[in-house]
Amino acid sequence: MAREIKNMLGGTSTGFEIDLEKLHSHESRVVSDMQEVSMNFKKFPAVVFRTFSKNGNVTYLVFRTGSISISGCKSEAHFNKSCDYIETLLKKYRA
């Protein structure tokens, strides 16, 4: 039986708080088939940020505290690249 990693789950933290309203407001205006941003604080206390690429779809749950849960990565290298991407993006939304 062959084994393969199909989906990894991990987390990181920015070390600073995030302005979730600003993140949602600005990033949801980006018209792209490469990303999707949603939030509904009545149901869940985070912004759901999804990216779509040939390397696989990645979902980030971004919390006000700066904690980020990441799922959808196919390898440790993919996870590290995804962490770098979201941490760089979130610097614009420091609270």
Image (tube, helix red, strand yellow):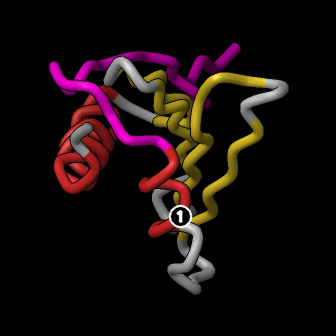
Q: Quadrant of residue 36?
A: bottom right
Q: Disc 1 marks which amino acid?
A: Ser
Element carrying mark 1: helix
Q: Which residue is denoted by mark 1 in the rendering?
A: 25
In-front residue for pair 8/59: 59
Q: Residue at x 25, y 51 (%)?
A: 85
Image check: 61 left or right of 75? Answer: right
Q: Quadrant of residue 80?
A: top left
In-front residue for pair 87/17: 17
| Residue 82 drawn in magenta | no
In-front residue for pair 84/87: 87
The spot of residue 27 in percent (x, y) is 48, 67
Crowd class of label 1 (few under 14; some 14 to 19; many from 20; radius 10 Å): few
Q: Residue at x 51, y 48 (%)?
A: 21
Q: Quadrant of residue 45?
A: top right
Quadrant where the C terminus sits is top left
Q: Which residues are magenta?
A: 1-20
